[in-house]
Image (spheres, rainbow, N blue to C red):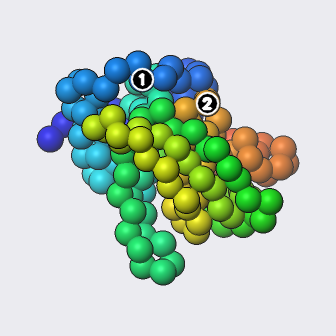
Amino acid sequence: MALLDIRRLGAKVLRRKAEPVEEITDETRRLVSDMWDTMYEAEGIGLAAPQVGISLRILVVDVTNEDESHHRRALVNPVVVESSDATDKAMEGCLSMPGIEEAVTRPARVTVEALSEDGEPVRIEADGLLARALQHEVDHLDGVLFIDRVSPLKRSMLRRKWRKRKTE
Ligand code: NI
């Protein structure tokens, strides 16, 4: 088990567009395994590689939807290929901004295509919390944080709260 250092708001790597994984190797799988350990230790439901300082397009999510279906996925080079017009608003947080939460509006359903950690193509039709978690984590791969998805007023409020929290 290896725990990685989770980068917080302000770290440049969180704002970079991550590179696609060219080849899935044992090293990729080791990173995924370490990301699982790190995510569970931090009691998160999702984690993207840039959050542990690695600018590669890899994410992990472990969520249970309202219908009690359980989804545990490691995705390499994930792409949101379809988004519903219908949206959904719910609270989000992020391991890179602990203690900060805000309601975020996102498409209610998405289809994501990716590779598994074994290099197999996967296609996921997601709704509920899974859809939200996947969109949040794919955003991380593009250098986008959930605070970018709220109004400018809310965003400056959250930033103030974050700065205050950090200096306490
Ligand atoms: Ni996050």
Compared to residue 77, the image places residue 92 above or below, namely below
Q: Label 1 amino acid?
A: Val
The alpha-carbon separation of the residues under discs 1 and 2 comes to 14 Å
Q: Label 2 amino acid?
A: Asp
Residue at 35%, 57% in the rendered image: 72
Residue at 31%, 38% in the rendered image: 117
User: Does residue 42 appear anywhere in the picture?
Assistant: no
Q: Residue 68, percent across and down?
A: 42, 79
Q: Residues within 10 Å of mark 2 (few under 14, many from 20)?
A: some
Query: Mark number for residue 101?
Result: none
Task: Point out the residue furthest to the left here.
Answer: 1
Q: Residue 16, percent across and down?
A: 58, 22
- Where disc 1 sits, the SS reads loop
Query: Mark number for residue 21?
Result: 1
Left or right placement of residue 102 versus residue 32 in this view: right
Q: Residues within 10 Å of mark 1 (few under 14, many from 20)?
A: some
Tag count in the figure? 2
- Where disc 2 sits, the SS reads loop
Which mark is first along the chain, 2 or 1? 1
Q: CB atoms at circles 1 and 2 under 8 Å apart?
A: no
User: Does residue 156 appear anywhere in the picture?
Assistant: yes
Query: Mark number for residue 142?
Result: 2
Q: Nearer the viewer, mark 1 or mark 2?
A: 1
Compared to residue 17, the image places residue 122 above or below, namely below
Residue in front for this viewpoint, 32 or 83: 83
Q: Residue 2, percent across and down?
A: 19, 36
Q: Quadrant of residue 129?
A: bottom right
